[in-house]
Image (cartoon, coloured by chain):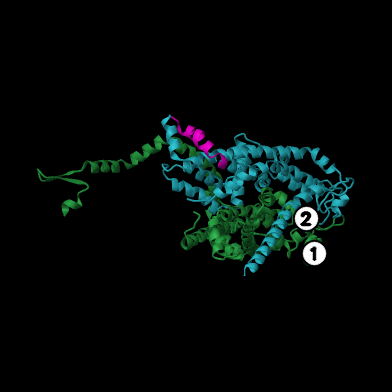
Chain colours: A green, B cyan
């Protein structure tokens, strides 16, 4: 029994009746002893490979991770220590978080921003997620390749325009009326659907009632076509034999959609849903920033009530003494976002073997 | 029974075509409107007479843009930032992605996590802003006074693009690399002679993504180069200039108290000039759009991010 157990590292010499170390085990021991030395040699031998990583690591450290280090500032008092050096400030506890929740001026604004972030994100998911799938299913119905290509070129296009251009278009098409200009051209369409004239004259983007609708529509306009690419690829990847089999079983168009197409694209749908949920709370602040009423006139800031999100709230505080409060607010927001992405990913992994990371 | 399914199919087809055509028209309409408004007179644009086609056609808004010196200086800044920014981002991304694609790289999972984490969590606007301000200070102190370089070097990072490149490099068969190594190729030669030619499509796609995000970049350029100080406006990218023009001269930013800086003598509206600028800023993208379309459709489908 003993002999069998130790077979792989000891050799029993029949003639002398003694055991000796197997040469293979000697090599293994040697390797084990020199493990770190060998690792060092491998790295040295491959130094070019590691050198290639350096620029990327450096860029990410300096401009992605260094700001995360600066986050420490929202637990510290910026009036102490050496100015501009976060590590020398004195710890200040959770004072700024406390201000966020209890301060008379900041707290209502923060809750408003927080609520708006969630509502904007939720509507974005509710309308922005199914639309590309519907478009992809519809594209699949178009038999003529030429017609489909033309339509696809049209719907992908807005994705490539910059936020400044998109918001300029939105602002002008829904513009307010003044002494020498009439309300925007597309406002009329809203008028047909019952938007009241005062809101149209005020500029629909700046009315608390219609801002969200316009934001969601412009978001769909920008992204829905482009996002449909992924789903369309999944739809055309469905094998024709599946359709044939369904037809033989007597399935009509709707039944084919229900039992063939949708199950085949489900994994793509889940992956895209995870991605969407992951980016949920990082709503496009650039666009919101540009759509907020600016300037000093009487209409300025009239859509803050529904448009202000956590990022723009933080941005407004970036040059004031309440910098740290803004940082704290956005950190909370981003932490929740991170929990969402990790959580949704692990749920998807458990439920369906599809996961992103 | 047979008859009934045919009817439902027909209805579905009609709905599909209707929605698709409507949505396609919706997608191009604002651009057509922009072009028409740029060619129309002040009365037509401000009076809401332009619906689809130009009314009272004139080219004076375009003439205004063509003779606007600062617009073209800022336009060349955008070209500068787009070119150098794309080269820089693509350069370190290719090198990093190549290293990450190698199984023999120690700590590979750690490096991957290092990248992916930035997709999950970002520090937020204020720390990022302070970081960029410090960066431009450091750059100024070492003699790089042009703030454009801050934009080129410090911005436009995208972990997804690196992962796209990495996945594409992982797909290159290792036999080809081994053959090259037997012929005496060094690491860099393997990358430039084997990997880059074999992943041309992905690299083109990623270059395109970087390029477009650079061309369209607004927010951080606006924050880092606030303008107002002597000569700083001359470092702006064109997007910042367009927005500044919109804020200054048109009456559409919500402030109805008249910005009467626009001369009443002009026969063209500030809106027309804005649209002429928009058209100028969109033309390069529209010009390359037909050629790139097939690449990005491919690139998006490769984008299954996996660890």
Label at residue A173: 2
State the residue lying farthest toward the bottom: B1
Label at residue B273: none
Callout 1 crowding tier (Cα within 10 Å): few <14, some 14–19, many ≥20: few
Label at residue A191: 1
Residue B200 is one of the magenta-drawn residues: yes
Answer whether residue A320 is visible to the viewer in this image.
no
Residue A143 is one of the magenta-drawn residues: no
Instruction: Report the predominant secondary structure element of the magenta stretch.
Output: helix
- The N terminus of chain B lies in quadrant: bottom right
Left or right: residue B243 versus residue A126 is right
Q: Earlier in the sequence, mark 1 or mark 2?
A: 2
Q: Quadrant of residue A173?
A: bottom right
Image x and y of residue A86, in percent = 54, 49
Query: Is the residue at mark 1 from the same chain as the one at mark 2?
Result: yes
Left or right: residue B236 versus residue B259 is left
Task: Say which of A211 and B291 sits in front.
Answer: B291
Circle 2 sits in a helix, a strand or a loop, which is it? helix
Residue ID at (81%, 42%): B62
Callout 2 crowding tier (Cα within 10 Å): few <14, some 14–19, many ≥20: many
In this picture, which residue range is highlighted in magenta? B184-202
* Chain of the residue where label 2 is placed in the rendered structure: A
Answer whether residue B97 is visible to the viewer in this image.
yes
Image x and y of residue A205, in percent = 75, 59
Residue ID at (69%, 58%): B17
Instruction: Measure the C-alpha gap from mark 1 to mark 2.
Output: 13 Å
Could you tell me how many numbered marks the image carries?
Answer: 2
Task: Say which of B15 and A355 sits in front.
Answer: B15
Image x and y of residue B233, in percent = 73, 41
């Amino acid at each position: 029994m003993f002999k069998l157990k130790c077979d792989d590292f000891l050799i029993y010499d029949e003639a002398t009746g003694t055991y000796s170390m197997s040469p293979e085990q000697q090599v293994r021991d040697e390797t084990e002893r020199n493990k770190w030395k060998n690792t060092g040699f491998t790295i040295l031998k491959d130094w070019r490979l590691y050198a290639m990583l350096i620029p990327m690591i450096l860029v990410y450290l300096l401009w992605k991770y260094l700001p995360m280090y600066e986050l420490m500032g929202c637990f510290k008092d910026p009036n102490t220590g050496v100015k501009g050096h976060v590590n020398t400030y004195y710890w200040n506890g959770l004072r700024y978080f406390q201000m966020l929740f209890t301060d008379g001026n900041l707290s209502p604004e923060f809750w408003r921003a927080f609520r708006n972030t969630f509502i904007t994100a939720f509507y974005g998911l509710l309308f922005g997620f199914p639309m590309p799938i519907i478009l992809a299913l519809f594209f699949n119905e178009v038999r003529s390749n030429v017609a489909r290509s033309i339509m696809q070129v049209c719907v992908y296009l807005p994705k490539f325009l910059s936020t400044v251009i998109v918001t300029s278009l939105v602002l002008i098409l829904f513009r307010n009326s003044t002494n020498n200009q009439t309300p925007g051209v597309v406002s009329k369409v809203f008028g047909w659907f019952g938007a009241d004239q005062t809101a149209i004259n005020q500029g629909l983007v700046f009315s608390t009632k219609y801002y969200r609708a316009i934001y969601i529509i412009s978001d769909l306009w920008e992204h829905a076509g482009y996002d449909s690419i992924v789903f369309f690829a999944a739809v055309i990847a469905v094998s024709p034999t599946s359709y044939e089999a369904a037809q033989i079983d007597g399935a009509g168009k709707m039944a084919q959609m229900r039992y063939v197409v949708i199950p085949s694209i489900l994994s793509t749908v889940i992956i895209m849903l995870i991605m969407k949920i992951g980016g949920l709370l990082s709503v496009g602040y650039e666009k919101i920033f540009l759509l907020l009423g600016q300037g000093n006139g009487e209409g300025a800031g009239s859509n803050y009530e529904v448009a202000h999100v956590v990022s723009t709230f933080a941005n407004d505080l970036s040059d004031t003494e309440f910098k740290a409060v803004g940082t704290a607010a956005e950190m909370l927001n981003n932490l929740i976002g991170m929990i969402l992405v990790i959580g949704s990913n692990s749920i998807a992994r458990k439920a369906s073997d599809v996961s992103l990371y | 029974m047979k008859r009934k399914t045919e009817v439902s199919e027909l209805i579905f087809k009609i709905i599909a075509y209707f929605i698709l055509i409507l949505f396609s028209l919706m997608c191009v309409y604002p651009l057509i409107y922009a072009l028409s408004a740029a060619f129309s007179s002040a009365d037509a644009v401000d009076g809401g007479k332009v619906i689809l086609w130009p009314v009272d056609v004139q080219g004076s808004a375009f003439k205004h843009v063509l003779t606007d010196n600062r617009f073209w200086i800022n336009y060349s800044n955008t070209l500068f930032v787009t070119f150098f920014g794309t080269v820089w981002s693509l350069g370190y991304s290719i090198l990093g992605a190549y290293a990450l694609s190698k199984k023999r790289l120690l700590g590979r999972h750690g490096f991957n996590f290092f990248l992916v984490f930035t997709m999950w969590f970002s520090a937020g606007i204020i720390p990022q802003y302070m970081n960029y301000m410090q960066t431009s200070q450091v750059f100024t102190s070492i003699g790089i006074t042009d703030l454009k370089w801050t934009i080129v070097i410090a911005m436009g990072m995208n972990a997804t693009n690196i992962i796209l490149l990495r996945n594409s490099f992982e797909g290159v068969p290792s036999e080809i690399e081994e053959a090259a190594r037997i012929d005496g190729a060094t690491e860099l030669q393997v990358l430039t002679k084997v990997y880059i030619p074999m992943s041309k499509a992905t690299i083109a796609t990623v270059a395109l993504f970087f390029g477009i995000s650079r061309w369209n970049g607004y927010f951080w350029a606006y924050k880092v180069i606030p303008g107002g100080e002597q000569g700083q406006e001359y470092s702006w990218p064109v997007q910042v200039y367009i927005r500044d023009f919109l804020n200054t001269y048109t009456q559409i930013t919500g402030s109805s108290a008249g910005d009467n800086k626009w001369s009443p003598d002009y026969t063209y509206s500030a809106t027309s000039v804005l649209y002429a600028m928009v058209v100028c800023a969109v033309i390069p993208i529209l010009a390359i759009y037909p050629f790139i379309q097939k690449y990005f459709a491919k690139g998006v489908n490769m984008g299954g991010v996996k660890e």
